[in-house]
Image: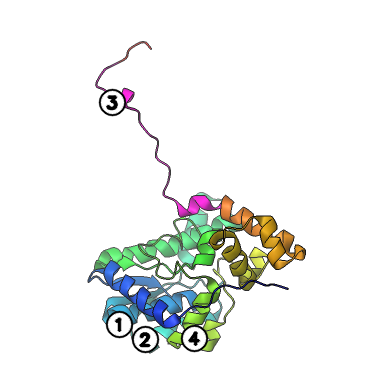
Amino acid sequence: MTVCQIPAMDYGVVEREICRFLRKEANGRGVVLGVSGGVDSAVVAALAVEALGNEKVFALMMPETGTTPAADTKDALELVEKLGIRHATIDIAEASQKIIEATERSGNRLAEGNAKARIRMVFLYYFANLEGRIVLGSGDRSELLIGYFTKYGDGGADILPIGGLYKSQVRGLAKRLGIPERIAVKKSSPRLWPDHMAEKELGLGYDEIDLLLHLIVDKKLSPEQVLREVGQESRANVEKIVFRVKENAHKRKVPPVAKISARAVNGKTHLGR
């Protein structure tokens, strides 16, 4: 039995701190964000409206015919209407198909799924550029730490308001903000292919992921120390999370830049060497 838990949070304080962050980073500008019908984007949208006012928030809903469940689109639309924010809906199916047709390569689910995430990023930045806004990302700390996002896709944003909260904490904040229960508890999914569910792909639930991340990252325990906390039967899951945190570290960094030495820029030309 688990003897360690993620520390409890004062969601009132969390709400106020994120709103201050949003006002500071927006600096008078409007914001654009994708709203999917899931808990993360719902929380970000609600916080943005609270911090900036609904006139400063623009939402894009970007379903894909044949992949996105109608219930998700309905939830997203009802949320933005409840929040009173301007919004638009763009079906990404045609744009996604154009990429496949242009490359004449199909059948790689991962490549096609990542392309869809990057298509959504392109639309967000297109509208941000048109209206002088910044793009809000909806990635949470769980996703960021294990690298469960598409580089330059849903990972492409100007700021990440809930990037410091684990998924389970985002759900707690959602309840405080009055997000509808069906959205607050909905199973997470990037919706990159039909029946795509995050926890099914990851192989374990977010409650366990969050606890393991807390022990590994926050408490800086070794894998063996973590196993003493959660039990030896969780060894495979502990190894899986440790691997994901290390393997996907590149997603949390800017691209490496080649360093040019002083010898190369000292103004001398070296011929024949």
Query: Tag 4, which secondary structure?
Result: helix
Label 3 and label 4: CA atoms lie apart by 58 Å
Q: Quadrant of the N terminus?
A: bottom right
Left or right relative to 141: residue 235? right
Query: Tag 1, which secondary structure?
Result: helix
Name the residue rendered at 32%, 24% in the picture: 264
Disc 3 marks which residue?
A: 265
Amino acid found under the numbered disc labelled 2: Leu
Across and down, in percent, residue 217 comes to 55, 60
Rendered image: mark on residue 83: 2
Mark 1 packing: few (<14 Cα in 10 Å), some, or many (20+)? some
Instruction: Looking at the image, tell me whether mark 3 or mark 2 is earlier in sequence order.
Output: 2
Name the residue rendered at 39%, 83% in the picture: 80
Across and down, in percent, residue 19 comes to 34, 76
Mark 4 packing: few (<14 Cα in 10 Å), some, or many (20+)? some
Quick check: marks 4 and 1 in contact, CB under 8 Å?
Answer: no
Instruction: Looking at the image, tell me whether mark 4 or mark 2 is earlier in sequence order.
Output: 2
Q: Is residue 102 visible?
A: no
Instruction: Looking at the image, tell me whether mark 3 or mark 4 is earlier in sequence order.
Output: 4
